[in-house]
Amino acid sequence: MKSNVTTEMLRRVNDELTSNKPKVVSKPSLTISLANTHHTQPHSVHAPVPEVPEQIAKLKSALSVLSSDVPRGQGKLYETGETSVSEDYWLLVIWAIASLGWTCGEEIARYWSKQSDRFTDEGFEQAWNGFDPNKPDKVGIGSLYKLAKAYGWTALKIEGVLAPPIPVSDRYKVMWPTDIANIQPIQWRLKHVLPATGLAAIYGPSGSGKSFITVDLGGAISHGKPWFGIKTCQTTVIYVVLEGEAGIRNRIWALEKAQGPLPPTGFGVITQPFEIVKPQDLIDLSAVIPSGSVVFIDTLNRAAPTADENSSRDMGEILEAAKTLYRVTNSLVVLVHHTGKDASRGMRGHSSLFAAVDGAIEVSRNDTKRSWTVAKTKDGEDGKTVNFRLKHHVLGQDADGEDIVSCSVEPDSSQVFVNREPSGAKQRLALAAIRRALASATNSGKCTAGTGTPCLTVTEAITTVAAELTTELANKRNYKAKGLIDALLGGGFISSAIDAQGDGWVWKL
């Protein structure tokens, strides 16, 4: 099939990769020359910084290159001496904003902090109120700006000289209600799950069946057939297989046994090595992808073999390359990825990956079932979970007369739709702990739980969940556990009641 990628598109790929590198960086070799430390900061810590739009915009610009998902730190700019900027800078940022004395300062600091999954209102309030404006060596806003510069930020105001006024242009357009009414609705590739264009992910632990799910979904899209009862919009599928290349023939063979022969030019496979952050690799791949396709890259780890997945800088480069690929080819790019050691925490690596995708499907497996869950979707409800199983096919015999086998995917008819899972990582962690405890519970049928339904006392449930919260302070774990159990009750994931003796009980719906 002839590619729809033009020479101009390929030029844009190269330009975007070589000229527009991500501005947000993490954990670089951060050193500041002592020869430059004498420069005057934009504002002395002794001179008040006016709370005006220009200064507010400057602060927000500096915060945009700093991740809030970093250790708390001691509120210091330097780790040792004055040459190595600390990577544990969360408290430094909070105190630097507090030093401004702005009425909007707390709101800005709180919003920035909430970008981290570790945010708690209690921890933020403690840090914000802990700033001492009378301390002789207190943190000032200049320290925040110096930190941001070390992470690649270019100040809006340098050496006390304001940037020239912004010329009037028609770059931005205000949309009024009549304009908004004419916005085209989202176009779906997998209705209410994956958009027609953009960036998405399919992820799960090794052995969960995510590659089989990927191939099955790709087959359904290439046919335009419903997938697990969900409408698809037909288009060409390109499957870049970077793991298990030797087995792809059998997987496609099994797919065709399950779904019927694939369209002759509807499902294509690429098996050559591909590195997503190499401009030439991206240009060459773009050249063979028909416009409007779905491109599966299996797996992200093999497509970025030298990247540090936990680094915001490396992940930023990966995401920028993936976005360039879908922009140039007008396609949906789906990254197939692994979970970490703790599957309840979602995709492995930096949190910016999950934040950047427009849709995500999580594949999981336990002793009794496999399932996939809508982990994220645009303008739709996530949390829907569907069970599936692998259907084995004997495809023929090899030269030694042994069976050639592979698998396709089919719904698990014993229970197609299952209860949704909590969206929050800590709630999922708490629910998993309660499930394990219920499996060995010695009490059952309490209150309205139903005959034979395992039950825990409320105290047992709190103790069980608290034992999992190893990252919390020991004296805070029971308090946090109570909050998580309340959230699970409110979300309808567990039930609770008090018996005639006044004892509280918890059980799973």
Image (cartoon, helix red, strand yellow):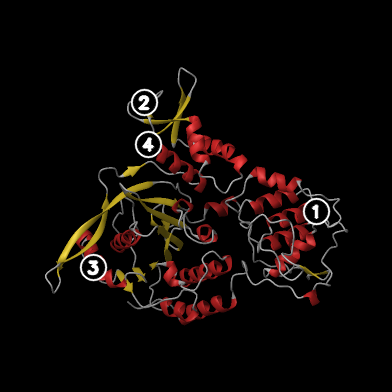
Amino acid carrying mark 3 in the image: Asn
What x and y, as percent, mark residue 461? Answer: 48, 34
3D distance between C-alphas at marks 3 and 2? 49 Å
Position of the N terminus by quadrant: bottom left
Number of other residues with Cα within 10 Å of mark 3, as a class: few under 14, some 14 to 19, many 20 or more:
some
Q: Residue furthest top?
A: 500
Q: Please identify, in this view, whether the residue under mark 3 or under mark 4 is nearer the observer.
A: 4
What x and y, as percent, mark residue 446? Answer: 40, 24
Number of other residues with Cα within 10 Å of mark 2, as a class: few under 14, some 14 to 19, many 20 or more:
some
Number of other residues with Cα within 10 Å of mark 1, as a class: few under 14, some 14 to 19, many 20 or more:
many
Amino acid carrying mark 2 in the image: Gly
Q: Secondary structure at mark 1?
A: loop
Mark 3 — residue?
250
Q: Say the numbered circle drawn on residue 440.
A: 4
Whether residue 109 sits left or right of residue 247 in the image: it is right
Residue visible at 27% across and 69% down in the picture? 247
Number of other residues with Cα within 10 Å of mark 4, as a class: few under 14, some 14 to 19, many 20 or more:
few
Q: Earlier in the sequence, mark 3 or mark 4?
A: 3
Q: Secondary structure at mark 2?
A: loop
Q: Secondary structure at mark 3?
A: helix
Mark 2 — residue?
445
What x and y, as percent, mark residue 332? Answer: 42, 64
Amino acid carrying mark 1 in the image: Ser
Q: Say the numbered circle drawn on residue 193.
A: none
Q: Earlier in the sequence, mark 4 or mark 1?
A: 1
3D distance between C-alphas at marks 1 and 3? 64 Å
Q: Earlier in the sequence, mark 1 or mark 3?
A: 1
